[in-house]
Image (spheres, rainbow, N blue to C red):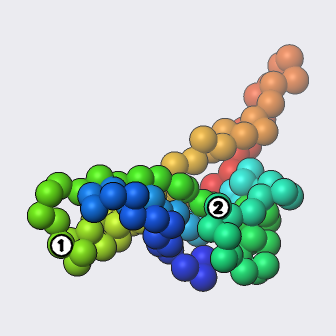
Amino acid sequence: MPRLRIIILAQDDPRTFSYVLWADVPVTRQSFYTNAGAVSTWRDALPADNAALASGAVVERVDKMIVPPGTTLAQARAQLEINWQSFQDLITNRNPWARYGTIWDGTTWTAAGVV
């Protein structure tokens, strides 16, 4: 699991937040997220955080959120939590590698895939 889930980078104006989300990558799919040079956009990420990103154990999304006028800080935080959960659900449930490695030798198909 990532050490943190949501990191606010800036409040660009009273209604706009720039933020980072970190999501846990299922073990069987981590190799597809591996990027040896990956470092977080958040400059205060710890070496262990960057190592998790580089290894593919954690994936990062940088985004902005514009809230309606009159939104309280508590409401903005609640929306960020919803955004994080949606991102985590996407990473957990989306699997474009479900058929990865399936081959055909000219005669027979051999099914493969990553769970």
Quadrant position of residue 67: bottom left
Quarter of the image with the N terminus in it: bottom right
The outermost residue toward the left is 70
Q: Residue at x 72, y 54 (%)?
A: 33
Position of 77 relative to 19 (above/below): below
Say what amino acid the circle numbered 2 marks.
Answer: Thr
Q: Secondary structure at mark 1?
A: loop
Quarter of the image with the C terminus in it: bottom right
Say what amino acid the circle numbered 1 marks.
Answer: Thr
Q: Which residue is mark 2?
A: 41
Q: Residue at x 87, y 23 (%)?
A: 105
Q: Is residue 58 visible?
A: no
Image x and y of residue 51, in percent: 79, 72
**Is residue 18 rendered to the left or right of residue 91?**
left
Q: Which residue is mark 1?
A: 72
Position of 39 relative to 111 (above/below): below
Image x and y of residue 19, in percent: 47, 62
Question: Are there few (<14), some (14-19), or many (20+) residues within 10 Å of tag 2?
Answer: some
Image x and y of residue 46, in percent: 72, 80
Between residues 21 and 91, which one lies in front from this camera angle?
21
Q: CA distance from mark 1 to mark 2?
A: 26 Å
